[in-house]
Amino acid sequence: MTSSFDATPEELSIVSTLWTQAQGILGEFTLSQPGLTAGSVSAALKTQTGNIYTGICLDFACGIGFCAEHAAIADMLKARETVITAILAVGPQGFIPPLWSLSRIDDAGQPAQPPDSSLAETRRLRTAH
């Protein structure tokens, strides 16, 4: 799979770093019993301060679980950071558009719309197989 962005070299560097971090933790595994898995999707995000946080999804047969993006955001929030400048999710087939297309979480905990130049704006990604 090849991907290209209408992006600056700095933005491409950020995407490359996030891709490497997310790929490094990607890999589905079974938890304590059948129907409980984790890691089939991973995510990485970069904050305004330059820190990178990662997460994996949890898939439970009962319907409870959460997305990799949520896990990465929770990891970020543990460090008391709230401003996301880029977020990327990957699965076994490659890039997955993030469920949270955001650049920051406002004071009420609601996702805010990213600026037009944000890497979180996934419609700019063009993928060819």
Image: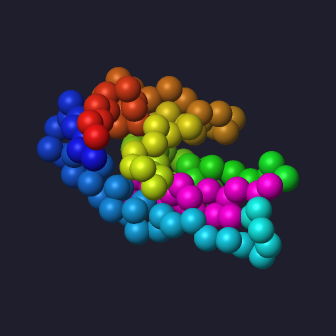
Residue drawn at 55 percent across, 37 percent down:
100
Q: Is residue 80 visible?
A: no
Q: How is the image coloured?
A: rainbow
Camera-side residue: 127 or 45? 127
Q: Residue furthest top?
A: 116
Q: Residue furthest right?
A: 62
- Asked whether 40 falls inside the magenta stretch, the response is yes
Residue drawn at 28 percent across, 40 percent down:
129
In-image side of 33 versus 75 (left or right): right
Where does residue 8 sit, x and y in percent of width and height?
17, 38
- Asked whether 86 falls inside the magenta stretch, the response is no
- Magenta-drawn stretch, dominant element (helix, strand or loop): strand
Where does residue 9 sit, x and y in percent of width and height?
14, 44
Where does residue 113 sit, x and y in percent of width and height?
50, 26
> Vertically, is 47 above or below 121?
below
> Vertically, is 79 above or below 47?
below
Camera-side residue: 103 or 72? 72
> Vertically, is 88 above or below 125?
below
Camera-side residue: 101 or 76? 101
In-image side of 110 versus 60 (left or right): left
Residue drawn at 30 percent across, 58 percent down:
17
- Indicate the quadrant where residue 6 lies: top left
> Vertically, is 101 above or below 77?
above
In-image side of 89 versus 57 (left or right): left
Where does residue 47 sit, x and y in percent of width and height?
42, 51
In-image side of 110 versus 3 (left or right): right
Total labels: the figure holds 0
Q: Residue furthest left?
A: 9
For the magenta stretch, what is the residue range?
37-61
Q: Is residue 7 visible?
A: yes
